[in-house]
Image (cartoon, grey):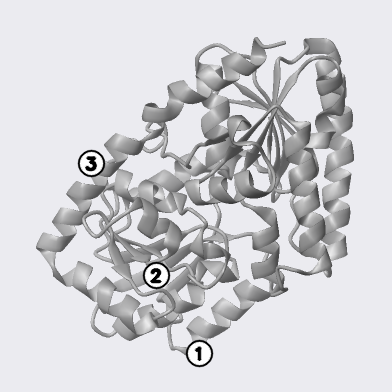
Amino acid sequence: MLTHSTYETDNRVRRYAETLARRGDQVDVIALCSGDVPLGRVTIDGVNVHRIQRRERNERSKWTHVWRLLRFLLTSSVLMTRLHRGRRYDLIHVHNMPDFLVFAAWYPKLTGAKLILDIHDIVPELFVSKFNTGDKSKYVSALKVIEKASAAFVDHVIVSNHLWHKTLVARSVAESKCSVFLNHVDPAIFYRRERTRTDGKFIVLFPGSFQWHQGLDIAIKAFARIKDKVPHAEFHLYGVAGGGSLQNDLVALASGLGLDGRVKFHNSLPIDQMANVIANADLGVVPKRADSFGNEAYSTKIMEFMSQGVPVVVSQTKIDSFYFNNTVVRFFPSGDDQAMAEAMLEVIANKDLRSALIAGGYEYVANHSWDVRKKDYLDLVDTLAHTG
């Protein structure tokens, strides 16, 4: 597997890799590392992880980021070629972003290995949202060409939700070589955990990337509206990774709203540690913007909250309305911090509603966990690995 992410924090990559390792497959992952984690090879739960480059978030321009991506592409290609010569991989599973990482696997493909491109996030639409460009810009057109070429290069494409599957099939890949695998919660990691926190606080939690489409400013404003009504509440955000202008803006916003000490920013954690944090939360929030990339970006954290018996307040985006309803989450109109505050207060104050959401969440997870789809993924791997 090849991923431009840190293995320990990437739930989707870990779920695939550890599932394969548990059944006895040999799995190597080429990935990034962060912080003071050393470069080199380490074995995690039976998976050989090769950390080849540090993830830095101090880019002064998009070209700095592009250069680092290209360096990762070259370095990973050299390592993958060397490893393949010694081990003759049956399958290379490449995770975007970016899509063009599939070309790092040119030598394994040339010598018989099958390739999967796993699209976690659909890149042209994310670029439009992040850089506020039109969908007809030359950059977006170039990204669509790269997407199509990358899909043509591989033997199968996996996409992370049904809305994006429809987009990709219309634009870049034949339906016969494209499958949907959601970010299913993995019971091997998100089993029901005991609550260990006894400090009397009411913890509102957001775990995830600090990006504009996540609507974290909306959530902070909503929390400011309830802080006096729930004086023992704190809002914890996990996802800090080296700062950045958006994070600084969020810190300044919280301070300006008088939330110093009530809103706390934490570094991202390995996914198994994050499961413990979620288990000790009282309310999960997913405040994505519906007028951006977030409208169609599936929220893995919703099912992670559900798996730990944590009720969730969710922005009513197109994607989350597609997969969830009011029996399992409490929706609020996207972008409306007043409505979000009211939804949070309703879940906090209404014990019956909270109990119903928790029970509905447990049932949803049981019906949609990784255990339900795991065989489909293993069948896909085996079919590709034994073809041709």
Q: Secondary structure at mark 3?
A: helix
Vertical placement of 141 versus 9: above or below? below
| Residue drawn at 84 percent across, 69 percent down | 61
Amino acid marked by disc 1: Gly
Q: Which residue is mark 2?
A: 235
**Residue 46's spot in the image, x, y percent?**
58, 20
**Residue 113's spot in the image, x, y percent?**
76, 18
Q: Earlier in the sequence, mark 3 or mark 2?
A: 2
Q: Secondary structure at mark 1?
A: helix
| Residue drawn at 23 percent across, 75 percent down | 345
Q: CA distance from mark 3 to mark 2?
A: 27 Å
Q: CA distance from mark 1 to mark 3?
A: 41 Å
**Residue 284's spot in the image, x, y percent?**
35, 60
Indicate left or right for 140 with 328 as reference.
Answer: right
Total numbered circles: 3
Q: CA distance from mark 1 to mark 2?
A: 15 Å
Q: Which residue is mark 3?
A: 363
From the viewer's perspective, is the residue at label 3 or at label 2 nearer? 3
| Residue drawn at 28 percent across, 58 percent down | 329
Amino acid marked by disc 3: Glu
What crowding class fits label 1: few (fewer than 14 Cα within 10 Å), some (14-19), or many (20 or more)? few
Q: Say the numbered circle drawn on residue 256.
A: 1
Q: Earlier in the sequence, mark 1 or mark 2?
A: 2
Vertical placement of 351 versus 387: above or below? below
Indicate left or right for 341 with 250 as reference.
Answer: left
